[in-house]
Amino acid sequence: MKRVKLFLAVILSVLACFFLLPGCGGEKGDETGTGTIRDELVVIIDNTKIAVLDPHNPAASSSSTAWAFHMIYDTLVKEEDGQFYPDLATSWNTDDWKHFTFQLRDDVYFHNGEKLTADDVVFTVERAKENPGSAGYDKLAIVESARAIDEHTVELVLESVNVEFLWYLSDPRASILNREAVEADPDKGTWIGTGAWTVSEFASNEYVVLEANENYWGEKPKTKKMTLKYVAEESTRLMQLENGEAQVCFSINANDYSYVESQPDKFVTYSFTTNNNSFIAFNMNDPICGDINFRKAVAHAIDREAMVASAFNGYGEVNTLGTFWGYRTEFKNTDIPIIPRDLDKAKEYLAQSKYNGETIEIVSAIPDLIKTAQIVQAQLAEVGIKTTIKETDPPGMSAYASYADNKAQMIVYTASCGLNGGSMKALLYPYGSSNRASYNNEEVARLFDLAVTQPDPKEREATYHRIQEIVAEELPYINLLNTVFLVCCAKGVDGLKLSNLAFHDLTYMYMVE
Amino acid sequence: MLRYIVRRLLWLIPVIILVSLAIYILMDLAPGTVIDSLITEQMTPEDIEKLRQEYDLDKPVIYRYGKYMWGLLHGDLGRSQVTGISVWESFMTRFPATLKLSLVSVVIGTVLAIPIGIFAARRAGTIWDNLTTGFTLIGQSMPSFWLGLLLLIAFAYKIQLFPAGGYRGPSSYVLPAVTSALMMTALTARQTRSSMLEVLRADYLRTARAKGVPERLVIRRHALKNAWIPILTTIGMGMSRFLAGSAVIETVFSWPGIGRLTVEAVSQRDVTLACGCVILTCILYVIVLLIVDLLYAFVDPRIKAQYASGGRRRKVTA
């Protein structure tokens, strides 16, 4: 019996050590005047997950994938507040906005030790064009041909004139890959970039572990190791932040925002407003929703503040303009007044419309927007519009409400809006990938085509403003709000560069303990 | 016995055909396709059509299914339609995490359940029996996500004894394993109790006791040995269920297992990955149940004799 007890005691002690000891220990880094910079940071990414580390893979379109791309790769140019600066290219020139020549840096090496050459740029462009559906293709498909003039000079010829090309080049999904690495290993060769961080471990949809690139050609990161990981459960994310298992969290539940903000001794928060619009779209081919009077009735019936308060816990920027344009998209027309909530006017327009008491179907996806749709439903009921809500998921939404085959009547959803004016084509151009309204106006399409050929910003501004005026008159969309997101960090975290597109740059993020 | 094993394994073929066909048809009926997860801003209708052709979405579902099965016949589970990563690789990246968690859960579940079941059976009808029955009832009916969150709050957040999720180091196994083991503990304890109750009333135990065999030995050597079959079945079923992965437990504890992989594949309409995951899970399920069946033979000599005779019934002579 004694032997059995002794055996059990030994087993229990071993188990206790096995389970409890790994939690001990920590990381200390460089001493600074104000404290010590932590060597390792663990970042809980948003809900988009990192499925692949390959800009030319269709699964690489998520925002958090772009964060990893920012860290692993470099682009030819980089953008800040609508201005373009050298990155891998030291200079560039174009005479006609169709032929571009880029001069590359000659001191850049990939993580595998290969030197960056013009051939890598040619390879990247050609590979992107072979992969439709990928974000890299999205940015580089307009390049008709790429040619290495010499080892450090590359010429890109576009299919047509496009004055917004540099916007595309500055996107992290247009990053430059290494030909040799990718050809040698098509699966893992894309992990090789020229960026400030190297990939040390990657598990699809789970985590990526990055280490600072000691040989980086630019400013070196202060942190030595960073893990970007996906945590599925929202309450678990907050717990991990609370008990120090993670230092940064991009995706805590909006219900917990006020709690985090009330703990300034523990946390520091940063916020950003997404450029993506949450909207109501009307199927313009539907007999009732295609009627402008019905659309105006809806526009007068809705109360955006109630949506932000109820569906987004107050964390949303209510749209105050009548234009349907991205939150920070260039050339936004701020002169178009919003259609105010006015229930009497709503009823007047409804009486003039083709609506005769039918039940209108509102399609929505994503929990916050489904809640928004429910609020829209209640508000429309106030003026006598009967609705029913069809809930789906994002692939279901794309199938149900696409430009060519739109089975929906009204849609409450969100769409990605870029910072360049041309990015709004996705919503307003015939066959646009996010054109949930099946909106087709020849004049709008012509003006979009014209805008990208206008190098003069003033002319381009006039064109984009005109587009917004036409869209505001026809009202295929009602812009509701832009969500405000809170990034919660342990106290001492800094160096984070947030983006309205949610393509945040974590390259120089650090934490002083 | 070999013939029996081969026969059981051959049953996998119709199971795989039926399961994969069901997945293909069900996912085809769901709104949206994998293309809808991949559409980007600048894609033209031509690009989308090109992708549709590439994924054979312009062809009937039966054609796609036939093509998939042809690949499967050649040992190719295909590649994820979303990420392009091989299904086998995706599965095997996650499988170790699921396997380890399953084993730890089964060990915890069994170690707790059998003593509880014996304890309750020996004190049948007493307050202790009622208490253990109550415990098993709670264990069976408590939603695992709720229990998981409670354990997280208590042990990861308040006491900070274990990490709040993740798959890093042995300490990260404790909370998810305890959560998933509790359900199994409840089931196995109930099964042990009822099996033991049946056996404890048997004549041969009364004889053993009459011969003066200590109660401890009566239970361990005579009663438990004869009650093993149903207990083993419950443990096997638990193990199979764990190996199929639990999307709920994996979500709560950020466990990179195959349950979540399968759910994500379905939500992205990634038929190849979803189908591959389900087929591999089916194979695991059948293998575990086969192992359990084989273990019967070691536990019960009567079954061993049956295997030895190739499952043929003995002729009964008057």
Image (tube, coloured by chain):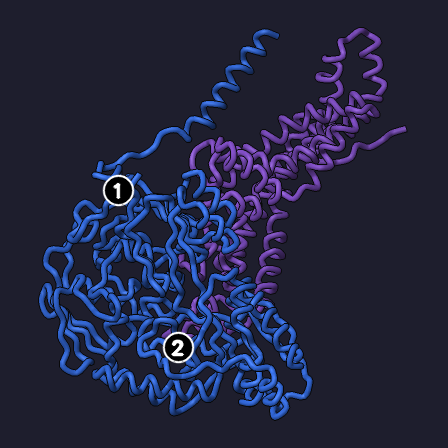
Q: Label 2: few (<14), some or many (≥20) within 10 Å?
A: many
Task: Kindly identify which residue carries mark 2.
Answer: A325
Q: Nearer the viewer, residue A469 or B156?
A: A469
A439 relative to A243, above or below:
below
Q: Quadrant of the N terminus of chain A?
A: top right
The residue located at (63%, 80%) in the rendering is A360
Residue A499 in view here: yes
Please give left or right for residue B63 compared with residue A276 in the image: right
Q: Nearer the viewer, residue A206 or B291?
A: A206
The residue located at (46%, 84%) in the rendering is A439
Tell me the shade of chain A: blue
CB atoms of marks 1 and 2 within 8 Å: no
Task: Kindly identify which residue carries mark 1.
Answer: A224
| Chain identifier of the residue bearing label 2 in the image | A
Residue B28 in view here: no
| Chain identifier of the residue bearing label 1 in the image | A
Pointer 1 or 2: first along the chain = 1
